[in-house]
Image (cartoon, grey):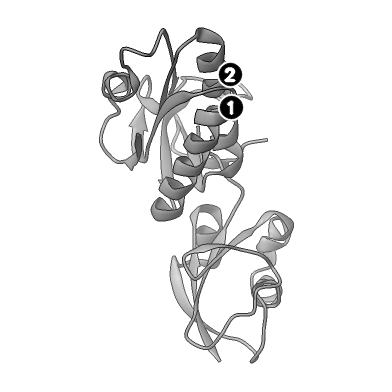
Amino acid sequence: MFYEVTEEALDPAALVAAVRGLGAGGLVTFVGYVRETSDDGRPVEGLHYEAHRELAIAELRTIGAEASTRFGEARVAIAHRIGELGLGEAAVAIAVAAAHRGVAFDACEYAIDELKKRVPIWKQERYLGGDARWRENA
Amino acid sequence: MTVRIVAFARIREIVGSGAFEWVAQDGATAGDILAALTTKFPQLGDLTRSIRFVHGGAFAGAATVVRDGDELGLLPPYGGG
């Protein structure tokens, strides 16, 4: 499968290509984008992401392996961007293929939920006006 | 003993460096070292209970014993996704 933490722009189509196959009757993607407003309503200029890259990739791999068996057989690809991202750029992309849609939906949701909890990646919101704040997942 | 501290994201900003040498007592655990660092950098106080450790290239618990020359990574709460 396909797990990466990269400074390059994400290509969700490459993840789809990595997991699809003739046995896959359903394919679910999730893409997380940089939003123009913070949770508390502040105008955002962009995001800065950083990672413990080695452990982040290892943990993505572990999550992918869990997601690919937990709900039924599935194929999983996960990519996370790091570095400086502008509004509308993709920060995370997940593709899951399975024989039937239920498994693919469940595995995709599991993958993004676990990524937020377990993968050593950090996000700083940069605001119009120049200040910035580290933002942590609940 | 001397250990190498590697600090990420918010922790790096609080301690002012991404990597530095730190003198600790022989036999100190990761948790002991974090407690000592928190004395020097009180702003870590809010974070200490949620900081995770990296030792020997893997996630490690606060009870992990750190040896002279080891590297100890300090991970603040995550924000990926």
Residue at 46%, 23% (x, y): give it. Answer: A74
Task: Examine the rendered structure and indicate whether residue B71 appears above or below residue A2.
Answer: below
The x, y position of residue B36, in whole percent, is 68, 78
Which residue is label 1 attached to? A110
Which quarter of the rendering shows the N terminus of chain A? top left
Q: Is residue B35 left or right of residue A4?
A: right
Task: Examine the rendered structure and indicate whether residue A15 appears above or below residue A21.
Answer: below
Question: SS class of the residue under badge 2?
Answer: helix
* Residue type pointed to by label 1: Tyr
Chain of the residue under the numbered disc 1 shown in the image: A
The x, y position of residue A119, in whole percent, is 52, 44
Mark 2 and mark 1, same subunit? yes
Q: Are marks 2 and 1 in contact (CB under 8 Å)?
A: yes
Instruction: State which quadrant residue B27 falls in.
Output: bottom right
Residue B61 in view in this figure: yes
* Residue type pointed to by label 2: Asp
